[in-house]
Image (spheres, rainbow, N blue to C red):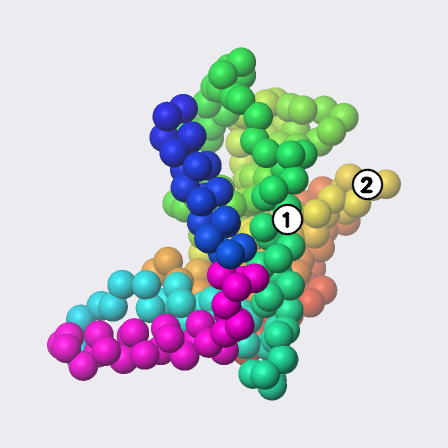
């Protein structure tokens, strides 16, 4: 709990600083941040060997690539990045968004412990049937999606039949009128990074994961 309190406190301090910068610093926008970050990484490249791994560069490149198409092309205009920062601060300042104490909850391992198929990765998406809490679908970042119908006693991989290697299920959406219809946002991982030029997909099932069909493919992602 102490660690959680420290993390929450640190986050609130960062948000306060971000709020002050956003309101007081005219140059606080996507373009000025990119300029400063590029200058910082260039300074490291001048003093480090070519083979040296620069800490934080990949995360920064992903961030820059994400926002590059979501702000104005004119650096003199404040684009959606500033709006995002403002809305993020407002959301975290909303009392309804604050985390409640977990001291009264009893956490238990729900598995999977032993399964026949691959199970490498971490859980990045989760759907629990609101009408039957024993029915859970859990998506991993590299090993597909797993399902249980008995609260975690038994699990099975329900996306192996898609045929994609190292599939990551980043999001799960279930049709509220027909739970046999499900959608998953899929990416393909390779050595813990998105495979180069490998598109992301939206897959759909109408028979509760027995078969899947791709309904959308998004290509052109960069690899960092």
Relative to 39, does residue 212 appear above or below in the rendering?
Answer: above
Upstream in sequence: badge 2 or badge 1:
1
Tell me which residue sits at (32%, 63%) in the image: 56
Q: Nearer the viewer, residue 174 or 102?
A: 102
Q: Looking at the rendering, in which quadrant would you find the N terminus?
A: top left
**Magenta residues: mostly which secondary structure?**
helix
**Dot 2 crowding, Cα within 10 Å, few <14, some 14–19, many 20+:** few
Q: Is residue 193 magenta?
A: no
Give percent across and percent down for residue 170.
56, 52
Tell me which residue sits at (46%, 30%) in the image: 112
Q: Dot 2 lies on which element? A: loop
Give percent across and percent down for residue 177.
86, 41
Q: Dot 1 lies on which element? A: helix
Q: Is residue 56 left or right of residue 96?
A: left
Residue bearing mark 2:
176
Residue bearing mark 1:
90
Relative to 95, does residue 14 appear above or below in the rendering?
Answer: below
Occupied quadrant, residue 128: top right
Q: Nearer the viewer, residue 214 or 30?
A: 30
Please say whether residue 124 is visible from this viewpoint: yes
Give percent across and percent down for residue 15.
50, 49
Farthest residue to the front: give it.
Answer: 24
Cα separation, mark 2 vs mark 1, equals 30 Å
Occupied quadrant, residue 174: top right
Q: Nearer the viewer, residue 59 or 96?
A: 96
Q: Which residues are magenta?
A: 21-49
Of badges 2 and 1, nearer the viewer stands 1
């Amino acid at each position: 709990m102490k660690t959680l309190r420290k993390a929450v406190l640190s986050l609130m301090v960062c948000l306060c600083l971000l709020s002050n910068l956003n309101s007081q610093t005219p140059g606080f926008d996507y373009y000025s941040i990119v300029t400063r970050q590029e200058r910082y990484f260039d300074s490291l490249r001048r003093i480090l060997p070519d083979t040296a791994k620069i800490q934080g560069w990949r995360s920064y490149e992903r961030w820059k690539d994400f926002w590059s198409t979501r702000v104005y092309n004119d650096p003199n205009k404040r684009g959606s990045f500033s709006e995002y920062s403002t809305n993020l601060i407002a959301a975290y300042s909303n009392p309804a968004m604050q985390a409640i104490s977990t001291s009264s909850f009893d956490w238990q391992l729900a598995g999977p412990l032993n399964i026949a198929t691959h199970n490498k990765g971490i859980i990045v998406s989760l759907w629990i049937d609101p009408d039957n809490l024993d029915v859970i679908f859990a998506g991993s970042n590299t090993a597909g999606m797993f399902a249980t119908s008995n609260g975690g006693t038994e699990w099975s991989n329900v996306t192996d039949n898609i045929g994609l290697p190292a599939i990551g299920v980043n999001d799960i959406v279930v049709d509220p009128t027909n739970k046999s219809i499900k959608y998953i946002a899929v990416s393909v991982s390779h050595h813990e990074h998105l495979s180069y030029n490998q598109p992301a997909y939206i897959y759909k099932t109408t028979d509760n994961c027995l078969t899947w069909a791709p309904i959308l493919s998004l290509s052109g992602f960069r690899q960092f």
